[in-house]
Amino acid sequence: MFNKDSLEFGLAPSSIRELFEYGKLRKKQIGEDNVFDFSIGNPIINPPKEFNDKLKELLDKDNIHSYTSAIGDEIARNSVVESIKNKYGVSLDKDLVFLICGSASGLSISIKSLSESDDDEFIVFSPYFPDYKVFVRNAGSKMIEVNTDEYMMPDLVDLDKKINEHTKAIIINSPNNPSGVVYDEKMIQSISQLLMNKEKKYNHPIYIISDEPYRELIYDNIKYPFLTKYYNNVIITYSLSKVLSLPGERIGYLIVSPNAEYKYELFNAFKGSARMLGYINAPSLFQHSLSFALNMSVNIDEYNENRNILYNSLKEIGYDCIYPSGAFYMLIKSPIADYDKFYDLAIKHEILIVPTKTFGKAGYFRIAYCVKKEQIINSIPQFKKLFKESKEC
Amino acid sequence: MFNKDSLEFGLAPSSIRELFEYGKLRKKQIGEDNVFDFSIGNPIINPPKEFNDKLKELLDKDNIHSYTSAIGDEIARNSVVESIKNKYGVSLDKDLVFLICGSASGLSISIKSLSESDDDEFIVFSPYFPDYKVFVRNAGSKMIEVNTDEYMMPDLVDLDKKINEHTKAIIINSPNNPSGVVYDEKMIQSISQLLMNKEKKYNHPIYIISDEPYRELIYDNIKYPFLTKYYNNVIITYSLSKVLSLPGERIGYLIVSPNAEYKYELFNAFKGSARMLGYINAPSLFQHSLSFALNMSVNIDEYNENRNILYNSLKEIGYDCIYPSGAFYMLIKSPIADYDKFYDLAIKHEILIVPTKTFGKAGYFRIAYCVKKEQIINSIPQFKKLFKESKEC
């Protein structure tokens, strides 16, 4: 009766969203403070007051809610170019900047644009953000999973094996959701070199789609290796959801590197894809906010503090944790082989953490620590009980 | 190299958008007042000041920019149900209300959800909004055009002929873009009766997708026949773009009638389609505004005044005009057989009006009169010169 894929993805909603909905219900039942909801990357830190104050000023202007060009207001696109120049010393082309409704739309648009036939392949590293699969399915292409090692870093030998003449792009997500790991400069150089060799071998571009909404959420003074410095065929999708705690507002940008092959043709395909998917323009009030929003950020010291408390406490309890250098996610390994059982026990202890099975690498759980510090502190005794009880099973 | 459809729709952007971009450029060249830009439905009337004031109050609240449920915040969905109850006396189900990024996304989501195979057909009445074709293509289905009569009303004989076992839905758009005509109760009853007979004949539901962003922009005291009163298998897609002059903000809703067959399954398909297309949730600040926004409207007396001046003046000059009872569009017929030539002449006279060729019915031009009254008044001598000159060709 209805679209098969739509029903599949509608009836089996993302495990994150499902847990998020359960959490909302459970809090109503037993009280907000008794549920340790680490399910979703919904940042608890409010945007800086200055941001909302400046939004209010915008609201006094004429035509602030009007249509913009489909690719976005020109002044706003210039602000993007300027901010990247200031932060990373990289020159972009405003006519290759597309303002979008958050990074998800950027992924859906770029994957569709690159998909010519159902032989086309998109490579992801497991564990990967589950909606990558959904966007690739929408485009009618195939998603190919490449392993990561015990530190959740790409397995380059496996990457080398999986690339073939059908590979259209690889999707990189650093800082990573769900693992929180950051690919350092050396890793980016290695991936780039490997891809350049493959491009020569197969004689066509292999794009990197860099999904980087967590780009500015990096700890331990690690420097972010901006992709266009290392590789030419780069597409960047970015959002202000995390850096400025605006996840509900759906504002971000999609960039084609000025060094990419067929760059203007690709950008035109973006325009057509956006139109087909039903996007008219990115929300206009937030487009106009970019002139100041791109220079703002939430105070990430709060996330850093959460991270340190969580990592150290869970290690001490005995959990096997992946050390997170960015974003606000941390993976812990199930202390027992039966990870479904561990999940049920966690729910029993009112701890809502996301199993990574749907991320393509079972046996781990994602903790989104973009929550109040008190929640972290209060959850530790529960995590301890959970660990003990799971070991007794 | 890239997706064929995306390139097609990206390289040949909508005639409306193209003209809109030309207009922006032209105004820079010769001054705002010297270009009579009737290209796009970008309402010139600002939203009521009270609306922006209340948005400012929202900005002082916590978590106003956070993720909501994918289908939208529950309080906001309740506001939709309440507003429809108050305005039309119709009871809806909040769990069949999906908050969306404007009506375009609602169309893209619902068409995709109803598309099972490439045999599926969606019926539109010509002239139709050109992006219908784009959304149907995205879903992999076929668009079937049904004629309208000289008053731009559906040709029911042709509709009867074009429905077959592959018909999944017909798309209704009243008040209509581009013609401004409104389907009265009798027309809706006739269409409903015809469809019910066809449903019996083919033994499956044929949905009406009612695209109604102009529902509250109706003149001459015509009463809007709310679709669910006449037919069961109804999907409504609505937006606040026009009624409240918020076209850039992308906020609206998609409804499945509580009387529709397979309603929950269809709604689940909506969830899956929205996810596949890259929508996360409708912009959250504007979701939260619905509790007050749904009770507000721009002052449509201004549009009515524009309409009357324009219609009467152009009739007097000699143009053949379709009488518009709603929206803020009016069609004029090309005074000469060579409508491409007429278009060129209009551009020469700095009059930007959209040819209806891409709307599936050539020979007419759409005038979007959601502009300043002065622009209408100042354009009349130009329209007069244009008429005269075209007749002299």
Image (cartoon, coloured by chain):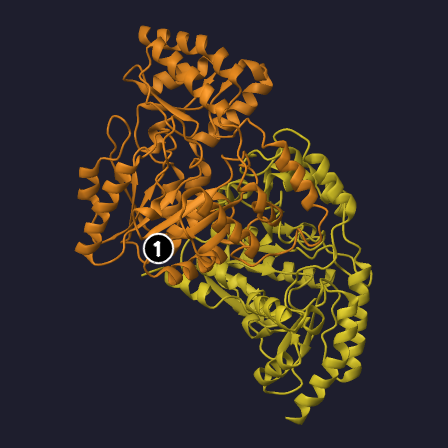
Chain colours: A yellow, B orange
Q: Where is residue B251 in the image (x, y as percent from the top left)?
A: 53, 44
Residue A371 in the figure: left or right of residue B6: right
Please identify the quadrant where the N terminus of chain A is shown: bottom left
Using the rendered view, name the quadrant where residue B338 is placed: top left
- Residue A229, compared with residue B353, is above or below; it is below
Amino acid carrying label 1: it is: Leu
* Crowdedness near tag 1: few (<14), some (14–19) or many (≥20) residues, C-alpha within 10 Å: many
- In the displayed orientation, state which residue is furthest to the bottom: A392
Residue B119 in the figure: left or right of residue A3: left
Q: Nearer the viewer, residue B299 or B341?
A: B299
Please identify the quadrant where the C terminus of chain A is shown: bottom right
Q: Which residue is drawn at 31% across and 35% down?
A: B183
Q: Is there any visible trace of residue B47 in the rendered image? A: yes
**Marker count (numbered):** 1
Q: Which of A89 and A243 is in front in this view?
A: A243
Q: Is there any visible trace of residue A92 in the rendered image? A: no
Q: Position of residue A73 (x, y in %)?
A: 61, 35
Q: Residue at x 41, y 18 (%)?
A: B308
- Residue A2, compared with residue B10, is above or below; it is below
Q: Disc 1 designates what residue?
A: B114
Q: Which subunit holds the residue at mark 1?
A: B
Q: Which residue is drawn at 23% across and 41% down?
A: B190
Q: Position of residue B272 (x, y in %)?
A: 45, 60
| Disc 1, SS | helix
Q: Where is residue A216 in the image (x, y as percent from the top left)?
A: 74, 54
